[in-house]
Structures are given as C-alpha cells and as structure tokens.
Image (cartoon, rainbow, N blue to C red):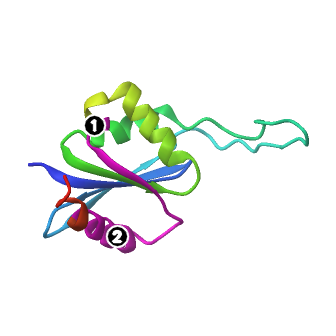
Amino acid sequence: MSYHACVWIDQKQAKVFEITTAEAEEVKLHDTRPVHHLHRKADHVGLGTVEMDHAMLEAVGKALGKAKAILIVGPGKAKTVLAGYLNEHFPEVAKKVWDIKPSDHPTDAQVVAAARDYFHKADRMH
C-alpha cells in the first residue's frame, strides 16, 4: 500500500511519518555514533560541524521505499543533506520528494497535521 510520508529530520534524529487518510504511523531513527563535543575556533570556516550519520540517512531512505509522495521538514541543513543523500543513493525515492520545508521543533501531532494539510493541497497539483 502506498502512502504519503513526512520526514522531520535534524542532525541527531529523524522521524518518518507514514500518513494515510485515517491514521499516521511513526518510525524514529537516531544517530548511532557516540557523542563528541566540538570546540569551535575563530576564523576557521567549516570547523565545528559534524557530518550526518550515513547509517541514519540510509535507514530513512529504506523507510521511505513504499511512499508515493514525500515531504521533508526540519531545522538547519539536515533536510537538504537528506535530499542530497536520497538523490545519490535512492534515486527512485528521491523522485517522490514533493517538497522540502523549514520547520523548528514541533510536536509529532503538529508535524502530522501540517503534512496532512500540505498533502491535501498538493495532491490536486500532482
């Protein structure tokens, strides 16, 4: 069965919501690496950032395999990193990404409600 999917993602975790008209099911995925504290240095561009966990991105790509439409939301650059990873490693899934939108840290219910509203409007255009 195909469904709409919404992914909320940041640097440390991803939540994949499988959304049908009647219900929403959530899959939580986390960065599996140990926590390392970074010390930033002035005048050194790019230092102080950690690359996203490829195991987590891989798990998200696999979780989205049966989705018919995908919305990616989240703070910072994690959402675009995921989109790029999908383009490179899961091109068939990447074709199903309808939009990428910024989002702070909403509750799960708020993510599902916003995704349902988005897909309700977007279904007419696709």
Residue 118 in percent (x, y) is at: 30, 65
* Residue kind at label 1, given as amino acid type: Lys
Horizontally, residue 25 falls left or right of residue 103, namely left
- Residue hosting label 1: 95
Q: What residue type is disc 2 on?
A: Ala
Cα gap from disc 2 to disc 1, whole angstroms? 21 Å
What range is drawn magenta here? 94-119
| Marked residue nearer the N-terminal end (2 or 1) | 1
Q: Crowdedness of circle 1 by 10 Å Cα count: few (<14), some, many (20+)?
A: few
Assign a secondary structure to mark 1.
loop
Seen in the picture, residue 91 relative to 68 is either above or below; the reply is above
Write down the residue under mark 2.
114
Please, which residue is most extreme toward the left here?
1
* Image position of 112 with respect to 123: above or below: below
Say which quarter of the image contains residue 91.
top left
Residue 6 forms part of the magenta stretch: no
Q: Position of residue 78 (x, y in %)?
A: 53, 46
